[in-house]
Image (cartoon, rainbow, N blue to C red):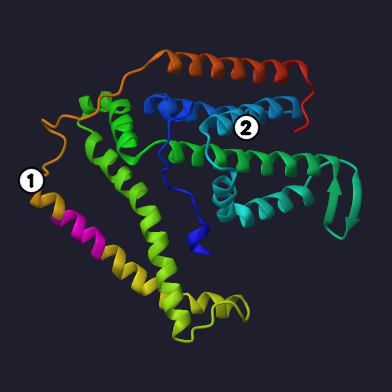
Amino acid sequence: MVRDVAFGQYFPGKSLIHRLDPRAKILMFIAYIVIIFCTFNFAALGVTVAFTALYLILSRISPKFYFKSLKIIIFIVIFTSLLNLFYGTGDPLWQWGIFKITLNGISRAVFVSVRIICLILASSCLTFTTSPNELTDAIERLMKPLKVIHFPVHEIAMMMSLALRFVPTLLEETDKIMQAQKARGADMESGNLFKRVKALVPILIPLFVSAFRRAYDVATAMECRCYRGGAGRTRMKQIHLSKRDVVAFITLALVIGGVIVCNIFVTSVL
Protein backbone atom coordinates (compact mmCIF):
# COMPACT_ATOMS: atom_id res chain seq x y z
CA MET A 1 0.00 0.00 0.00
CA VAL A 2 1.04 3.58 -0.63
CA ARG A 3 0.59 4.41 3.04
CA ASP A 4 3.38 1.94 3.88
CA VAL A 5 5.99 4.00 2.03
CA ALA A 6 8.07 5.94 4.55
CA PHE A 7 10.63 7.57 2.24
CA GLY A 8 10.74 11.37 2.56
CA GLN A 9 9.17 11.57 6.01
CA TYR A 10 10.70 13.26 9.06
CA PHE A 11 10.61 11.73 12.53
CA PRO A 12 11.47 14.16 15.35
CA GLY A 13 13.95 12.84 17.89
CA LYS A 14 16.95 13.59 20.07
CA SER A 15 19.40 11.00 18.79
CA LEU A 16 23.01 11.78 17.91
CA ILE A 17 22.17 11.84 14.20
CA HIS A 18 19.23 14.19 14.81
CA ARG A 19 21.53 16.62 16.62
CA LEU A 20 24.20 16.72 13.90
CA ASP A 21 24.48 19.88 11.87
CA PRO A 22 22.38 19.43 8.68
CA ARG A 23 25.28 20.75 6.60
CA ALA A 24 27.51 18.04 8.06
CA LYS A 25 24.92 15.37 7.26
CA ILE A 26 24.58 16.52 3.66
CA LEU A 27 28.36 16.64 3.13
CA MET A 28 28.74 13.23 4.74
CA PHE A 29 26.01 11.82 2.51
CA ILE A 30 27.72 13.17 -0.62
CA ALA A 31 31.02 11.64 0.52
CA TYR A 32 29.19 8.40 1.30
CA ILE A 33 27.88 8.20 -2.29
CA VAL A 34 31.46 8.46 -3.56
CA ILE A 35 32.69 5.86 -1.06
CA ILE A 36 30.02 3.27 -1.85
CA PHE A 37 30.93 3.32 -5.56
CA CYS A 38 34.67 3.10 -4.81
CA THR A 39 34.44 -0.30 -3.12
CA PHE A 40 36.04 -2.95 -5.32
CA ASN A 41 36.12 -5.96 -3.00
CA PHE A 42 34.06 -7.50 -0.22
CA ALA A 43 36.34 -6.13 2.51
CA ALA A 44 35.80 -2.53 1.40
CA LEU A 45 32.10 -3.20 0.94
CA GLY A 46 31.95 -4.63 4.46
CA VAL A 47 33.48 -1.43 5.87
CA THR A 48 30.80 0.73 4.20
CA VAL A 49 28.01 -1.64 5.29
CA ALA A 50 29.28 -1.50 8.90
CA PHE A 51 29.34 2.30 8.75
CA THR A 52 25.80 2.33 7.34
CA ALA A 53 24.58 0.03 10.11
CA LEU A 54 26.22 2.23 12.77
CA TYR A 55 24.61 5.32 11.24
CA LEU A 56 21.16 3.71 11.27
CA ILE A 57 21.52 2.46 14.85
CA LEU A 58 22.56 5.89 16.12
CA SER A 59 19.52 7.46 14.44
CA ARG A 60 17.21 5.51 16.81
CA ILE A 61 14.57 5.20 14.08
CA SER A 62 12.54 2.00 14.10
CA PRO A 63 13.86 -0.55 11.54
CA LYS A 64 10.33 -1.00 10.14
CA PHE A 65 10.49 2.48 8.61
CA TYR A 66 13.74 1.62 6.85
CA PHE A 67 12.19 -1.57 5.51
CA LYS A 68 9.23 0.47 4.27
CA SER A 69 11.61 2.81 2.43
CA LEU A 70 13.11 -0.21 0.65
CA LYS A 71 9.75 -1.29 -0.77
CA ILE A 72 9.93 1.30 -3.54
CA ILE A 73 13.21 -0.11 -4.94
CA ILE A 74 12.70 -3.87 -4.63
CA PHE A 75 11.97 -4.20 -8.35
CA ILE A 76 15.04 -2.10 -9.28
CA VAL A 77 17.29 -4.19 -7.02
CA ILE A 78 16.01 -7.48 -8.46
CA PHE A 79 16.19 -6.27 -12.08
CA THR A 80 19.74 -4.87 -11.86
CA SER A 81 20.94 -7.91 -9.92
CA LEU A 82 19.63 -10.28 -12.59
CA LEU A 83 21.32 -8.27 -15.33
CA ASN A 84 24.67 -8.47 -13.56
CA LEU A 85 24.13 -12.11 -12.58
CA PHE A 86 23.61 -13.37 -16.14
CA TYR A 87 26.15 -11.14 -17.90
CA GLY A 88 29.26 -11.72 -15.83
CA THR A 89 32.59 -12.73 -17.34
CA GLY A 90 34.62 -15.88 -16.70
CA ASP A 91 33.96 -19.59 -16.76
CA PRO A 92 30.24 -20.35 -16.44
CA LEU A 93 28.93 -22.25 -13.44
CA TRP A 94 25.61 -22.73 -15.25
CA GLN A 95 24.58 -21.87 -18.79
CA TRP A 96 21.41 -22.03 -20.84
CA GLY A 97 21.66 -20.45 -24.28
CA ILE A 98 22.97 -16.91 -23.98
CA PHE A 99 22.31 -16.87 -20.24
CA LYS A 100 25.13 -17.96 -17.97
CA ILE A 101 26.00 -17.62 -14.30
CA THR A 102 29.62 -17.03 -13.31
CA LEU A 103 31.42 -16.17 -10.09
CA ASN A 104 32.07 -12.72 -11.48
CA GLY A 105 28.37 -12.31 -12.23
CA ILE A 106 27.41 -13.37 -8.69
CA SER A 107 29.91 -10.90 -7.22
CA ARG A 108 28.58 -8.09 -9.41
CA ALA A 109 24.98 -8.90 -8.47
CA VAL A 110 25.83 -8.82 -4.75
CA PHE A 111 27.75 -5.56 -5.08
CA VAL A 112 25.00 -3.83 -7.03
CA SER A 113 22.28 -4.97 -4.65
CA VAL A 114 24.18 -3.96 -1.52
CA ARG A 115 25.16 -0.60 -2.99
CA ILE A 116 21.61 0.33 -3.95
CA ILE A 117 20.20 -0.82 -0.59
CA CYS A 118 22.85 1.10 1.35
CA LEU A 119 22.21 4.26 -0.66
CA ILE A 120 18.47 4.10 -0.04
CA LEU A 121 18.98 3.44 3.66
CA ALA A 122 21.44 6.32 4.00
CA SER A 123 19.18 8.74 2.11
CA SER A 124 16.20 7.61 4.19
CA CYS A 125 18.17 8.22 7.37
CA LEU A 126 18.99 11.73 6.15
CA THR A 127 15.33 12.63 5.60
CA PHE A 128 14.15 10.76 8.71
CA THR A 129 16.46 12.74 11.00
CA THR A 130 16.48 16.15 9.28
CA SER A 131 13.45 18.41 9.00
CA PRO A 132 12.66 20.11 5.67
CA ASN A 133 13.47 23.52 7.18
CA GLU A 134 16.89 22.29 8.29
CA LEU A 135 17.57 20.83 4.85
CA THR A 136 16.58 24.13 3.22
CA ASP A 137 18.92 26.13 5.46
CA ALA A 138 21.77 23.66 4.99
CA ILE A 139 21.46 23.53 1.19
CA GLU A 140 21.27 27.32 1.02
CA ARG A 141 24.35 27.72 3.23
CA LEU A 142 26.34 25.16 1.22
CA MET A 143 25.44 26.80 -2.11
CA LYS A 144 26.02 30.35 -0.83
CA PRO A 145 29.27 30.82 -2.85
CA LEU A 146 27.19 30.43 -6.05
CA LYS A 147 25.49 33.74 -5.33
CA VAL A 148 28.59 35.39 -6.79
CA ILE A 149 27.48 34.22 -10.24
CA HIS A 150 23.85 35.23 -9.47
CA PHE A 151 22.68 31.64 -9.05
CA PRO A 152 19.19 31.51 -7.42
CA VAL A 153 20.40 29.67 -4.32
CA HIS A 154 17.47 30.47 -2.03
CA GLU A 155 14.85 29.66 -4.67
CA ILE A 156 16.45 26.28 -5.48
CA ALA A 157 16.67 25.40 -1.78
CA MET A 158 13.05 26.44 -1.24
CA MET A 159 11.85 24.28 -4.14
CA MET A 160 13.73 21.25 -2.80
CA SER A 161 12.29 21.84 0.67
CA LEU A 162 8.72 22.08 -0.65
CA ALA A 163 9.21 18.94 -2.75
CA LEU A 164 10.39 16.96 0.28
CA ARG A 165 7.63 18.38 2.46
CA PHE A 166 4.90 17.28 0.05
CA VAL A 167 6.15 13.71 -0.55
CA PRO A 168 4.21 12.27 2.45
CA THR A 169 1.19 14.45 1.58
CA LEU A 170 1.03 13.22 -2.01
CA LEU A 171 1.48 9.61 -0.90
CA GLU A 172 -1.42 10.00 1.51
CA GLU A 173 -3.51 11.64 -1.21
CA THR A 174 -2.72 8.77 -3.59
CA ASP A 175 -3.85 6.22 -1.02
CA LYS A 176 -7.13 8.10 -0.47
CA ILE A 177 -7.82 8.23 -4.21
CA MET A 178 -7.08 4.51 -4.57
CA GLN A 179 -9.44 3.65 -1.74
CA ALA A 180 -12.15 5.87 -3.26
CA GLN A 181 -11.76 4.25 -6.69
CA LYS A 182 -11.89 0.75 -5.17
CA ALA A 183 -15.08 1.72 -3.33
CA ARG A 184 -16.54 2.62 -6.74
CA GLY A 185 -15.69 -0.84 -8.07
CA ALA A 186 -12.30 -0.21 -9.69
CA ASP A 187 -10.13 -3.35 -10.03
CA MET A 188 -6.41 -2.54 -9.79
CA GLU A 189 -4.94 -5.84 -8.67
CA SER A 190 -6.04 -8.34 -11.33
CA GLY A 191 -5.32 -8.75 -15.02
CA ASN A 192 -2.11 -8.47 -17.01
CA LEU A 193 0.43 -5.64 -16.82
CA PHE A 194 -1.35 -3.56 -19.49
CA LYS A 195 -4.66 -3.71 -17.63
CA ARG A 196 -3.03 -2.74 -14.35
CA VAL A 197 -1.33 0.25 -15.95
CA LYS A 198 -4.61 1.27 -17.57
CA ALA A 199 -6.33 1.00 -14.16
CA LEU A 200 -3.97 3.67 -12.82
CA VAL A 201 -5.41 6.36 -15.11
CA PRO A 202 -8.38 7.11 -12.79
CA ILE A 203 -5.80 7.62 -10.02
CA LEU A 204 -3.21 9.73 -11.84
CA ILE A 205 -5.64 12.32 -13.22
CA PRO A 206 -7.19 13.37 -9.87
CA LEU A 207 -3.73 13.14 -8.26
CA PHE A 208 -2.30 15.62 -10.77
CA VAL A 209 -5.29 17.91 -10.30
CA SER A 210 -4.87 17.75 -6.52
CA ALA A 211 -1.11 18.39 -6.77
CA PHE A 212 -1.59 21.48 -8.95
CA ARG A 213 -4.31 22.74 -6.63
CA ARG A 214 -2.03 22.35 -3.62
CA ALA A 215 0.80 24.10 -5.44
CA TYR A 216 -1.51 27.00 -6.28
CA ASP A 217 -2.68 27.21 -2.65
CA VAL A 218 0.91 27.24 -1.39
CA ALA A 219 1.87 29.98 -3.85
CA THR A 220 -1.15 32.06 -2.79
CA ALA A 221 -0.31 31.57 0.90
CA MET A 222 3.30 32.65 0.32
CA GLU A 223 2.17 35.77 -1.54
CA CYS A 224 -0.30 36.63 1.25
CA ARG A 225 2.59 36.45 3.71
CA CYS A 226 4.60 38.87 1.52
CA TYR A 227 7.18 36.28 0.51
CA ARG A 228 9.66 37.89 -1.87
CA GLY A 229 12.59 35.46 -1.91
CA GLY A 230 15.68 35.29 0.26
CA ALA A 231 16.73 38.94 0.18
CA GLY A 232 16.87 40.34 3.71
CA ARG A 233 15.41 37.22 5.32
CA THR A 234 16.60 36.07 8.75
CA ARG A 235 16.34 32.66 10.43
CA MET A 236 14.73 31.83 13.73
CA LYS A 237 17.13 28.90 14.30
CA GLN A 238 20.81 29.32 13.56
CA ILE A 239 22.90 26.25 12.70
CA HIS A 240 26.47 25.86 13.98
CA LEU A 241 29.09 23.15 13.75
CA SER A 242 29.85 21.49 17.10
CA LYS A 243 32.24 18.88 18.50
CA ARG A 244 29.91 16.05 17.58
CA ASP A 245 30.09 17.17 13.92
CA VAL A 246 33.90 17.10 14.07
CA VAL A 247 33.76 13.58 15.52
CA ALA A 248 31.39 12.55 12.72
CA PHE A 249 33.80 13.89 10.08
CA ILE A 250 36.71 12.08 11.74
CA THR A 251 34.71 8.83 11.75
CA LEU A 252 33.92 9.28 8.07
CA ALA A 253 37.60 9.95 7.35
CA LEU A 254 38.50 6.68 9.10
CA VAL A 255 35.92 4.86 6.96
CA ILE A 256 37.40 6.40 3.81
CA GLY A 257 40.87 5.33 4.95
CA GLY A 258 39.61 1.81 5.62
CA VAL A 259 38.07 1.57 2.16
CA ILE A 260 41.29 2.81 0.54
CA VAL A 261 43.39 0.28 2.48
CA CYS A 262 41.04 -2.56 1.54
CA ASN A 263 41.08 -1.55 -2.11
CA ILE A 264 44.90 -1.51 -2.14
CA PHE A 265 45.75 -4.62 -0.14
CA VAL A 266 42.79 -6.89 -0.91
CA THR A 267 42.30 -8.47 -4.34
CA SER A 268 39.55 -6.83 -6.36
CA VAL A 269 36.57 -8.97 -7.33
CA LEU A 270 35.11 -6.62 -9.96
Q: Main secondary structure of the magenta part?
A: helix
> Toward the viewer: 33 or 20?
20
- Relative to 78, does residue 149 appear above or below in the rendering? above
| Apparent side of residue 65 relative to residue 180 in the rendered image (left or right) | right
Label of residue 53 in the image? 2
Residues shaded magenta: 213-220
The reply to whether the magenta stretch includes residue 215 is: yes
Q: Which residue occupies 56% across, 52% down?
A: 68
Q: Residues within 10 Å of mark 2 (few under 14, many from 20)?
A: some
| Apparent side of residue 211 relative to residue 114 in the rendered image (left or right) | left
Q: Where is residue 128, by image quadrant?
A: top left
The reply to whether the magenta stretch includes residue 219 is: yes
Residue placed furthest toward the bottom: 185
> Toward the viewer: 141 or 67?
67
- Relative to 23, does residue 124 appear above or below in the rendering? below
**Circles 1 and 2 in contact, beta carbons < 8 Å:** no
Which numbered disc, 1 or 2, marks the residue that appears first in the sequence?
Answer: 2
Q: Residue 181: x, y in percent?
A: 44, 80
For the question of whether residue 37 can be seen, the reply is: no
Label of residue 45 in the image? none
Residue flagged by tag 2: what amino acid is it? Ala
Q: Residue 143: x, y in percent?
A: 30, 28
Q: Where is residue 19, by image quadrant?
A: top left
Residue wearing tag 1: 226
Q: Quadrant location of the C terminus? A: top right
Tag 2 secondary structure: helix
Distance of label 1 from label 2 (alpha carbons): 45 Å
